[in-house]
Image (spheres, helix red, strand yellow):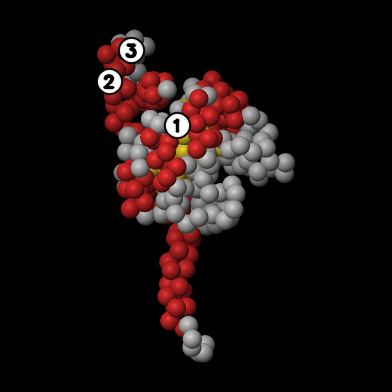
């Protein structure tokens, strides 16, 4: 599995080289090994920033997403997670860094939201995504997850399965998925926890699987703990690109202190 992953990452680097006009058709084995080594160095320990503004918020347009992407890149991130083919294309026009593309939909007959259709895969691949993420949870869905995975590979992209359980990740690994991510852990059943699911990341990484830690990673310490748990890479979203959410976190923490101080006292 790891061998196939590195081949696909190397293919992404070849794509970048083609864009930069350094590509030649005769790529030797030595050069391919060099590209694979370079790919490993760039992905291992990588920070991906998810640029998905709050729907309807002041940054929720193509220009806002591109500006967030540029800011994250200037800070040194290794790749970006972008929603929507139009926005992927706009960001691809300003960077050669790896782009994780997704399409989000609200379906009437399925709770699956992330890249549910094969045409979503096609639009993202055409837009310039190098990695395409999709919902791989065990829920009612319009297209089987393995068919989405197959289409991603047919289009020459790497596939990342957004999972909620250990078993879902294991199934995707067996199906040949390049990366599994903890994106949906805690979001499928019951109340959403406050902490990232480091235990799930560790269980997967202990198997030798290639894992992206994602979901509720809100501090630099969280990212540090994710890498310690064995994550190959970490994706951070709201903590970087949703200032409205971050403002709410600060207010919530402050209000807890105020509430404690007022316990047993009449409101003023």
Name the disc covering residue 216, or none.
none
> In the picture provided, is 179 more to the left or to the right than 230?
right
Q: Disc 1 designates what residue?
A: 179
1 or 3: mark nearer the eye? 1
3 or 2: mark nearer the eye? 2
What residue is shown at x 47% (from left), y 38% (from top)?
A: 181
> In the picture provided, is 13 more to the left or to the right than 141?
left
**Quadrant in the rendering for residue 31:** top left
Give the answer, above or below, for where 133 lies relative to 149.
below
Asked whether residue 170 is in view, the answer is: yes
Q: Disc 3 designates what residue?
A: 27
What residue is shown at x 52% (from left), y 29% (from top)?
A: 172
Give the answer, above or below, for where 67 lies relative to 267.
above
In percent of width and height, residue 50 lies at 45, 45
Q: Disc 2 designates what residue?
A: 34
In percent of width and height, residue 114 lies at 58, 39
Badge 1: residue crowd in 10 Å (few <14, some 14–19, many ≥20): many
Give the answer, above or below, for where 216 lies relative to 33.
below
In percent of width and height, residue 30 lies at 27, 13
């Amino acid at each position: 599995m790891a061998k196939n992953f590195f081949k696909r990452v190397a293919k992404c680097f070849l794509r970048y080289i083609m864009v930069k006009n350094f590509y030649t058709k005769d790529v030797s084995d030595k050069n391919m090994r060099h590209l694979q080594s370079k790919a490993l160095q760039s992905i291992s320990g990588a920070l991906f920033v998810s640029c998905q503004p709050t729907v309807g918020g002041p940054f929720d347009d193509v220009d806002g997403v591109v500006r967030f992407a540029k800011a994250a890149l200037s800070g040194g991130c290794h790749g970006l997670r972008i929603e929507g083919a139009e926005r992927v294309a706009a960001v691809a026009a300003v960077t050669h860094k790896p782009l994780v593309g997704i399409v989000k939909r609200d379906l009437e007959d399925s709770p699956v939201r992330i890249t549910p259709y094969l045409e979503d895969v096609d639009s993202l691949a055409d837009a310039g995504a190098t990695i395409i993420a999709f919902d791989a949870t065990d829920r009612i869905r319009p297209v089987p997850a393995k068919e989405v995975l197959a289409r991603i590979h047919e289009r020459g992209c790497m596939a990342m399965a957004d999972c909620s359980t250990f078993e879902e990740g294991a199934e995707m690994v067996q199906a040949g998925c390049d990366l599994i991510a903890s994106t949906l852990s805690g979001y499928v059943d019951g109340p959403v926890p406050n902490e990232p699911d480091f235990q799930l990341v560790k269980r997967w990484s202990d198997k030798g699987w290639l894992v992206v830690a994602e979901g509720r990673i809100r501090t630099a310490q969280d990212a540090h703990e994710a890498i310690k748990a064995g994550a190959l890479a970490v994706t951070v979203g709201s903590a970087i690109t949703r200032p409205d959410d971050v403002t709410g976190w600060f207010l919530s923490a402050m209000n807890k202190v105020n509430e404690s101080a007022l316990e047993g006292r009449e409101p003023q």
